[in-house]
């Protein structure tokens, strides 16, 4: 009631119309996605409406559209699970965020229904994490998946000390680039394996500029005595595999006795073959890492601190990786690059 005995009136807050990339069935992303206009959505009392600034095309996004990812949103769905945006409007009960704040979807609380490939997203306050506005948008949009994966894998499986070393395939990937730099910060050397392909010499130099200690082509490791190639570096106790097939075998080949290989991807879609010798005489361990499983383990405060830490490294120039900003209108071209149709490219980030 108001002072005159009348009823108070409340007007609904509505989001603007949103342009979105949607898919109504699973399949190849270049054939099942399309651009649509979504109607305005009510911003309820605990909701935050975010105007998206940038969002990447991650392998997991592609796998979700293909229908092969473990978590699949109900169809029809908007693509994308990561990105950065500016708060456009907030509901009456929202306390932690205000219009103008920069936010990212929290890796802890964002759901499989998020959909960051659209111009406006309305979700509950708890889905969003406020970040430093001074972080470059291409990093803000990509900080919560690949860099966080690299950080956790370095810390969760083997106790590493300064002077130790790690080995990885897929070293030119965003996770690979982050592992090189985060390891170097800890005084840990990195042995990196890349594919034999055009431009491999340039790729080697880029990785060395990031701090890679050794970079080998896969063909260079097809020798019996891999240890002789390491020079003064110790045999690694920890390895990372995101490819599978022969590339995974090369990681195992480099590990010392009792070493551990962590698999976090399968880009080749080929299985990991492990010799009996590796198990019996080297006592190797095989582990898996999935960021979504880790973030489900009540890690909210820890996760927030780690993202702030990683953004700090970006701001002071300690952590860097290649991205390519593409206008949202050029989604098809960005998708082709992300699918590998146009050769090898940096991570594609859509700019709204």
Image (cartoon, grey):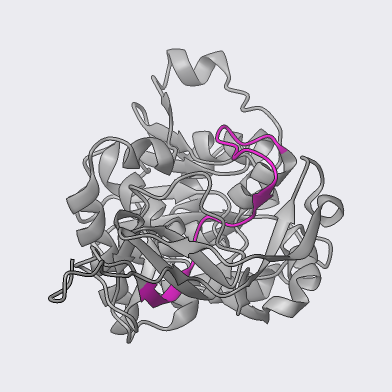
Majority secondary structure of magenta residues: loop
Q: Residue 265: which quarter of the image? A: top right
Q: At x 56% / y 75%, what residue is drawn?
A: 16
Above or below residue 130? Residue 317 is: below
Image location (x, y in percent) of residue 2: 17, 72
Q: Residue 258, position in %: x, y?
A: 34, 26
Q: Is residue 81 above or below residue 210?
A: above
The answer to whether residue 231 of the structure is visible from this angle is: no
What residue is shown at x 60% (from left), y 37% (from top)?
A: 72
Quadrant assignment, res 246: top right
Q: Is residue 122 visible?
A: yes
Residue at image coords 87%, 53%: 31
Q: Is residue 90 left or right of residue 299?
A: right
Question: Which range of residues does the magenta coloring cover?
Answer: 67-89
Q: Going 51% across and 71% down the picture, which residue do you hit?
A: 15
Among the 4 quarters of the image, the one containing residue 157: top left
Q: Is residue 195 above or below residue 88?
A: above
Which quarter of the rendering shows the N terminus?
Answer: bottom left
Residue at the farthest left position:
3
Find the residue positioned furthest to the right: 31
Image quarter in which the C terminus is found: bottom right
Q: Is residue 316 left or right of residue 61?
A: left
**In this rendering, would 184 be left or right of 320?**
left
Q: Please provide percent x and percent y for residue 181.
A: 37, 67
Q: Position of residue 276 (x, y in %)?
A: 54, 13
The residue nearer to you, when weighing 21 against 236, is: 21
Query: Is residue 6 one of those drawn in magenta?
Result: no
């Amino acid at each position: 009631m108001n002072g005159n005995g009348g009823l108070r009136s409340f007007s609904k807050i509505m989001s603007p119309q949103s342009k979105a990339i949607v898919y109504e069935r699973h399949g190849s992303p270049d054939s099942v996605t399309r651009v649509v206009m979504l109607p305005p959505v009510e911003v309820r009392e605990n909701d935050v409406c975010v105007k998206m600034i940038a969002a990447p095309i991650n392998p997991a996004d592609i796998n979700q559209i293909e229908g092969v990812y473990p978590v699949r949103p109900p169809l029809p769905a908007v693509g994308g699970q990561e990105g950065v945006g500016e708060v456009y409007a907030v509901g009456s009960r929202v306390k932690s965020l205000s219009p103008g704040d920069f936010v990212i979807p929290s890796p802890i609380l964002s759901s499989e229904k998020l959909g960051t490939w659209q111009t406006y997203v309305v979700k509950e306050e708890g889905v969003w994490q406020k970040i430093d506005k001074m972080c470059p948008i291409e990093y803000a949009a990509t900080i919560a998946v690949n860099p966080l994966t690299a950080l956790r894998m370095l810390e969760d499986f083997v106790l590493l000390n300064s002077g130790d070393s790690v080995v990885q395939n897929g070293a030119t990937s965003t996770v690979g680039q982050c592992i090189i730099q985060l390891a170097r910060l800890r005084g840990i050397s990195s042995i990196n394996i890349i594919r034999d392909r055009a431009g491999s010499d340039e790729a080697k130099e880029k990785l060395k500029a990031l701090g890679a200690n050794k970079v080998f082509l896969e063909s260079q490791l097809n020798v019996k005595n891999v240890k002789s190639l390491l020079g003064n570096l110790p045999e690694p106790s920890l390895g990372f595999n995101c490819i599978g097939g022969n590339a995974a075998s090369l990681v195992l080949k480099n590990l010392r006795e009792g070493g551990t290989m962590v698999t976090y991807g399968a880009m080749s879609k080929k299985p990991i073959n492990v010799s009996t010798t590796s198990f019996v005489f080297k006592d190797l361990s095989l582990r898996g890492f999935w960021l979504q499983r880790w973030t489900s383990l009540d890690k909210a405060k820890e996760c927030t601190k780690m993202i702030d830490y990683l953004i700090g490294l970006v701001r002071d120039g300690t952590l860097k990786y290649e991205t390519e900003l593409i206008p949202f209108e050029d989604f098809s071209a960005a998708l082709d690059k992300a699918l590998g149709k146009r050769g090898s490219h940096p991570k594609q980030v859509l700019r709204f």
